[in-house]
Image (cartoon, rainbow, N blue to C red):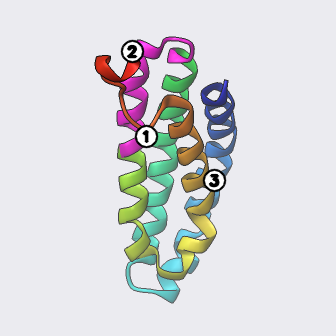
Amino acid sequence: MLLRISSALMLLCALPMLLWCLNLINNAALDYDYAGVGCFGAALVYAFSMVTAIAGLTFAGRPYRYGWCRILAYIQLAAGVLLIFPLYAYTVLTLPLLFILTILYLFGAGWREKRDSEQL
């Protein structure tokens, strides 16, 4: 249930945040050297979060497919962490929603795959 809720929230929030990150590029480029590139990267990560959310909605209820969901969420989380450095102060504006929703998504999909011996 948590996977469906976090996927739906991620899908609903991704497009407005993508557009907002694209609108911040000019202002960010004037303030810091690579912040404009960071805002563009954040927009790309929000576009990728739509793919992750669609995968979560598609594979919800099928635990044998949660591995794909986890892989996409880990890629998204790693891309978000890498964007902290070029965004500088704009990190506080653009990335908290991405991190919160990705962590909720990972809780819904499970942090790691359970081994057969642990399931018994």
Q: Nearer the viewer, mark 3 or mark 1?
A: 1
Task: Please tell me which residue is depicted at 44% across the width and 50% down the height of the picture.
Answer: 44
Q: Position of residue 11 (x, y in %)?
A: 63, 35
In this rendered view, identify the residue nearer to me: 2 or 25.
Answer: 2
Q: Mark 3 falls on what kind of element?
A: helix
Q: CA separation, marks 2 and 1?
A: 27 Å
Q: In this figure, which residue is indicated by the disc labeled 2? A: 120
Look at label 3 and name its amino acid: Met
In which image quadrant can residue 20 be found? bottom right
Asked whether the residues under the numbered discs 2 and 1 touch, taking CB atoms below 8 Å apart as contact, a structural biologist would say no
Q: Nearer the viewer, residue 43 or 70?
A: 70
Secondary structure at badge 2 equals loop
Residue lying at 64% horizontally and 36% vertically, measured from the top left:
6
Which residue matches tag 1? Answer: 73
Q: Are marks 3 and 2 in contact (CB under 8 Å)?
A: no
The crowding category of the residue bearing disc 2, from other C-alpha atoms within 10 Å (few below 14, some 14 to 19, many at least 20), is few
Asked if residue 95 lies left or right of residue 114, the reply is: right
Secondary element under disc 1, as helix, strand or loop, is helix
Of the image marks 3 and 2, the number of the one nearer the N terminus: 3
**Residue at 40% in and 62% down:** 81
**67 vs 43: above or below:** above
Range covered by the magenta-colored residues:
59-74
Q: Amino acid at mark 2?
A: Leu
Residue 48: x percent and y percent? 45, 41
Residue 45 is left or right of residue 92, and the answer is left
Q: CA distance from mark 3 to mark 2?
A: 43 Å
Q: CA distance from mark 3 to mark 1?
A: 17 Å
Observer-side mark, 2 or 1, equals 2
Q: Which residue is mark 3?
A: 17
* Majority SS type along the magenta span: helix
Question: Would you say the residues marked 3 and 1 are in contact, meaning their CB atoms lie under 8 Å apart?
Answer: no
